[in-house]
Amino acid sequence: MEFSNLIVVWSIIGIILMLAELVIPGGIVVLLGAACLVVAGALGIGLVEGLVQSLTLWFISAIVLLLAFRQVTQKLVGGDSHVDNTDEELDIYNKIARVKQTIGPGQTTGRVEFQGSEWPALGDGSIIAVGCEVRIICRENIALVVEPVNQAAS
């Protein structure tokens, strides 16, 4: 078997890419391998000649196959795609934080520890002492608006 023959080279690359789909799932590599087999077939029937035309046909056929069959391969192969909540306000609402620097009185900011980092915090106008647990109401710019947990329960 002669490896300078473009038909053989494109066929081998196509088969290797299609087999690589077993190791690299996602449905893309198999389509790139199929594009290689399209080029090998086009070389075999004399539709294209040479490396430049082969690469051009590969690029075009890969794009067409990816656009046409990507959804089909995603359904067959699956994957771990999921949509997370993109509203950060909902993620922090009603969570508990601990006061690190006294909040209040009035609009005086303090600091709370939440999710392993310290945040500036605003209260409801009353004094919230260090060490108290607070419930996060919302976020205003970079500051968290909080209320004492015992007040939220009543």
Image (cartoon, helix red, strand yellow):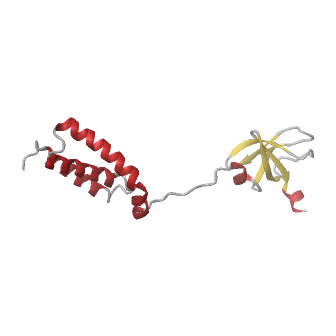
Judge by depth and name the residue closer to the eye, 153 or 43: 43
Say which residue appears at 25% left-offset and 39% top-offset.
Answer: 55
Judge by depth and name the residue closer to the eye, 100 or 50: 50
The percent position of residue 107, horizontal first and vertical second, equals 89, 39
Q: Is 87 on the left or on the right of 24, as rendered?
A: right
Up the image or down, 109 lies above or below 73; here it is: above
Say which residue appears at 84% left-offset and 57% top-offset.
Answer: 149
Q: In what quadrant of the picture does the C terminus appear?
A: bottom right
The percent position of residue 128, horizontal first and vertical second, equals 88, 47
Say which residue appears at 77% left-offset and 50% top-offset.
Answer: 98
Q: Is 146 on the left or on the right of 40, as rendered?
A: right
Q: Residue furthest left?
A: 1
The percent position of residue 151, horizontal first and vertical second, equals 89, 57
Q: Is 109 on the left or on the right of 2, as rendered?
A: right
- Image-quadrant location for residue 152: bottom right
- Image-quadrant location for residue 139: top right
Answer whether residue 117 is visible to the viewer in this image. yes
The percent position of residue 25, horizontal first and vertical second, equals 37, 57
Answer whether residue 10 is visible to the viewer in this image. no
Say which residue appears at 11% left-offset and 45% top-offset.
Answer: 3
Q: Residue furthest top?
A: 52
Judge by depth and name the residue closer to the eye, 91 or 125: 91
Judge by depth and name the residue closer to the eye, 48 or 126: 48
